[in-house]
Image (spheres, rainbow, N blue to C red):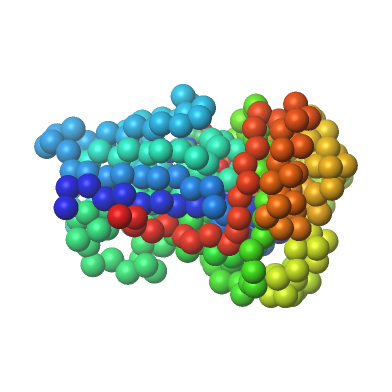
Amino acid sequence: MSSIRAVAPAKINLSLRVRSLRPDGYHEITTVFHAVSLADEVTVSAAAAGVGRIVTTVGDRTASVPGGDDNIAGRAAVALARHAGLPDPDVTIDIAKAIPVAAGMAGGSADAAAALVALRRLWNLDVSDAVLSEIGAQLGSDVPFSLMGGTARGIGRGEVLTPVLTDGELHWVVALSDAELSTPAVYAEWDRLLADGLVSAAGDAADADAPLLAALRQGDPREVARHLVNDLEPAAASLRPHLRGVLDAGSELGALAGMVSGSGPTCVFLAEGREAAIALAAEMSGTGLVRGVRHAVGPASGARIVA
Ligand code: ATP
């Protein structure tokens, strides 16, 4: 087959608790990832000998997305080939982006995950999902979840995953921001707020997310809404103060809950169901506070090949 196409989902963190800074510079976190229906599409094909990795990206605001091996999908190609004992590959990787860039929704990780599953097929490799996930974890903390999809608890840097049982669908309004935020900058701001005593590190309690997990099992969006938490929200809002206004607008417009997604600046709002989400999206868009809105449904599948 001359080209293979795969899709991979954006993620929302239903819970994101930040613990200590580790000696390797990463923060220890406990999180509940939730994959949603916004997805990037990645098409891979063999290229002429000697060209290396040619990565192109199309979509909204993709000017800042690098090409070649600076793109995480290019790095994924090299990592998978090396794992398989192959020379650095000549391959074209075309990315069609629906996941906003540098927005706290793991768009880069989704592209790496989609590239890994597509290239495994293109090169007919006998690599298990577990090994693909290990290769993904070397590329970025969120890549294993982009491969897995659904809803899952994550510990460590977020790469050690356990699937979570859920019932029903959750309907989200995704509010896009004009600004980008870099994840390291948001963690650095969180460290600064911690040093100033303005935030505190999450404790060891293994069951802090038990009420959220119970609500997900019940499939009750109102109950889920009560237990959403993002420890990075104060840091993202400190760097982008207008996010407070976006969150306030969502709650005034009747969202069950709203929060910054991951490291931001995208904000996500939970609605009672499909119709409520569509109505909320229209009203949010009318506020003029956001660059655009999307309706997204979770849980969504992890990275997979499409015909
Ligand atoms: P996360 O939520 O995983 O922390 P994010 O969603 O905030 O990440 P990304 O969209 O993954 O952010 O992009 C972060 C940066 O990574 C971009 O600013 C860009 O420079 C770089 N990058 C490399 N490859 C990609 C890619 N395929 N898509 C998007 N950004 C990429």
- Residue 285 vs residue 97: left or right? right
Residue 286, x across and y down, in percent: 75, 30
As drawn, the residue found furthest toward the left would be 49
Q: Establish if 129 lies above or below 55.
A: below
Could one spot residue 139 in this view of the protein? no
User: At 64% across and 69% down in the image, what residue appears?
Assistant: 168
For the C terminus, the image quarter is bottom left
Residue 235, x across and y down, in percent: 75, 40
Residue 126, x across and y down, in percent: 23, 67
- Residue 119 vs residue 239: left or right? left
In front: 91, or 201?
A: 91
Q: Establish if 214 lies above or below 82.
A: below
In front: 27, or 302?
A: 302
Name the image quarter holding residue 57.
Answer: top left
- Residue 217 vs residue 148: left or right? right
In front: 87, or 296?
A: 296
User: At 53% across and 47% down in the image, what residue appears?
Assistant: 38
Name the image quarter holding residue 44.
Answer: top left
Q: Establish if 190 lies above or below 62.
A: below
